[in-house]
Image (cartoon, helix red, strand yellow):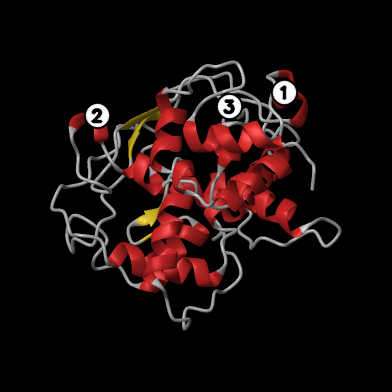
Amino acid sequence: MRVWLWLLAAVVVVTAGAGIYFLRPVNGPARDLTLVGDATRGAYLIRLGDCISCHTDAKNGGAELAGGAALSTPFGTFFAPNITSHPEAGIGKWTLAEFSRAMSDGEGPEGHLYPAFPYENYTLMSDQEIVDLFVALQATPPNPTPSRPHEVGFPFSVRPILAGWKNLFFRPQRYVADAGRSEEWNRGRYLVFGAGHCVMCHSPRNALGGIEPGRELTGNPAGGTGGRAPALTAAALAAEGYDETSLASVLSDGFTPGFDVLGAAMGEVIADGTSHWSAEDRAAVAAYLLDKG
């Protein structure tokens, strides 16, 4: 009897310890939110972060940034919310601090955010970028279209369990440049892993939805709404005939070295996002991905 009591006590202790670990808050470094935002720089960040293609239901005639089309995943279907300045339907009532927590720590006013929203990547953005982006979004025309609820079944519909996912896979931090590489290479790496979040779609994920360590940018064969996302490694890109010039070019016009045109989800990313980037940023991504920095 005493043995069973000890075993029961051990189970209780282990369970309690695991619960404390997996439910603990996951927060990154404090941000300086006293900075003065610039809406023009923020408008560029809207393009850099691909906000428009995700948060606009263009196929159904939705207004810009007033809510996105369905994103199908193994865990359910997600709908990007209205992020216009509308006070009820959008984020018009959000404070800068609330916006910063969402972008940096994946924590919204109503609790944990699903990682379908790439806060894993946006956490790398600088303090100034966060402030600039907030100012730009607050300057958008308010649209009353209500955000569509996610269609996620139990247990994934229980948001508190996302704390466990964060403790397993999320490390909020800011981008740190590699002093041994060029400024262009570092800019490209930041865009791929940070604001541009290429790594989010072009990497395989495990059964819990975390990116498989060490396999970043090796492609995501699982498909989903956007279809198969190919590898973006230097070897894979070279095999497709890309060099720095053509890789930067495809991010502008969608034309591949094989005379195809990128469509589907990547076509939307190019049309609404990368084609609006500066030539320098497209070149930086190409330099990083082909490791020519």
Q: Residues within 10 Å of mark 2 (few under 14, many from 20)?
A: few
Q: Are marks 2 and 1 in contact (CB under 8 Å)?
A: no
Query: Mark 2 vs mark 1: which is more N-terminal?
Result: 2
| Element class at badge 1 | helix
The tag on residue 59 is: 2
Q: Nearer the viewer, mark 2 or mark 3?
A: 2
Q: Residues within 10 Å of mark 1 (few under 14, many from 20)?
A: some
In the picture as drawn, the residue positioned furthest to the right comes out as: 180
Residue 77 visible at all? yes
Residue 22 visible at all? no
Q: Nearer the viewer, mark 1 or mark 3?
A: 1
- Decide which of 231, 243 is in the foreground and name it: 243
Q: What is the spatial separation of the Cα atoms under label 2 and label 1, in whole angstroms? A: 31 Å
Coordinates of residue 180 in the picture (x, y in percent)? 86, 58
Query: Looking at the image, which residue is at 42% across and 75% down?
Result: 37
Is 71 displayed left or right of 186 in the figure? left
Q: Residues within 10 Å of mark 3 (few under 14, many from 20)?
A: few
Q: Split into 4 quadrants, where in the image is the N terminus? A: top right
Q: What is the spatial separation of the Cα atoms under label 2 and label 3, in whole angstroms? A: 30 Å
| Element class at badge 3 | loop
Query: Mark 1 vs mark 3: which is more N-terminal?
Result: 3
Q: Which residue is mark 1?
A: 236
Coordinates of residue 153 in the picture (x, y in percent)? 34, 30
The tag on residue 207 is: 3
Number of residue marks: 3
In the picture as drawn, the residue positioned furthest to the left comes out as: 144
Query: Mark 2 vs mark 3: which is more N-terminal?
Result: 2
Coordinates of residue 20 in the picture (x, y in percent)? 58, 56
Q: Amino acid at mark 3?
A: Ala
Q: Is residue 217 above or below residue 42?
A: above
